[in-house]
Amino acid sequence: MPVDPEYYQRLEDAIDGILTELAGVLSSTELADVGEFNCHGEYGLALEELCAIISDGGYTVEQSVYEKIVTVGMTMGINSSWWSAIKTK
């Protein structure tokens, strides 16, 4: 079954949007690391790294950002264990 040609662009845009919202939360290095995966089409790695940075770093994110992370993950068919440790405000 062919993938919608805009599928990957929507993933990239969604992750970029999440990173923009987290600009005041994560460091510029952390944002750049995730952004690097994203701009090279490594959306799974970008999401995995983002979730790890947030949970391992003890960051707390807005509920709306968390929901966007969940939506991207579910769209890609990722196991919820990736984002289950993320804390929300």
Image: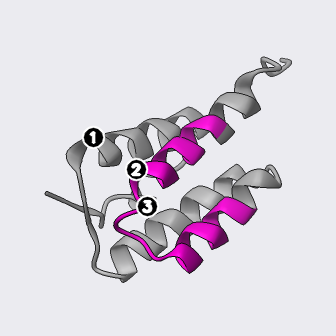
Residue identifier under label 1: 64
Q: Check whether the beta carbons of the residues at disc 2 and disc 1 lie within 8 A of each other.
A: yes
Amino acid, disc 2 = Glu
Residue for point 45% across, 75% down: 53
Residue numbers of the magenta segment:
13-36
Question: In 3D space, how far apart are the residues under numbered discs 2 and 1 (Cα atoms)?
Answer: 10 Å
Q: Is residue 43 above or below residue 51?
A: above
Instruction: Identify residue type, mark 1.
Output: Ser
Closer to the eye: label 1 or 3: 3
Check disc 2 and report its element: helix, strand or loop. helix
Q: Which residue is nearer to you in this view: 13 or 44?
A: 13
Asked if residue 3 lies in the magenta stretch, the reply is: no
Does the CB distance between marks 2 and 3 fall below 8 Å? yes
Q: Is residue 77 above or below residue 21?
A: above
Closer to viewer: mark 2 or mark 1: 2
Side of 58 where 46 appears, left or right: right
Callout 3 crowding tier (Cα within 10 Å): few <14, some 14–19, many ≥20: few
Q: Main secondary structure of the magenta part?
A: helix
The residue depicted at 56 percent of the width and 57 percent of the height is 47
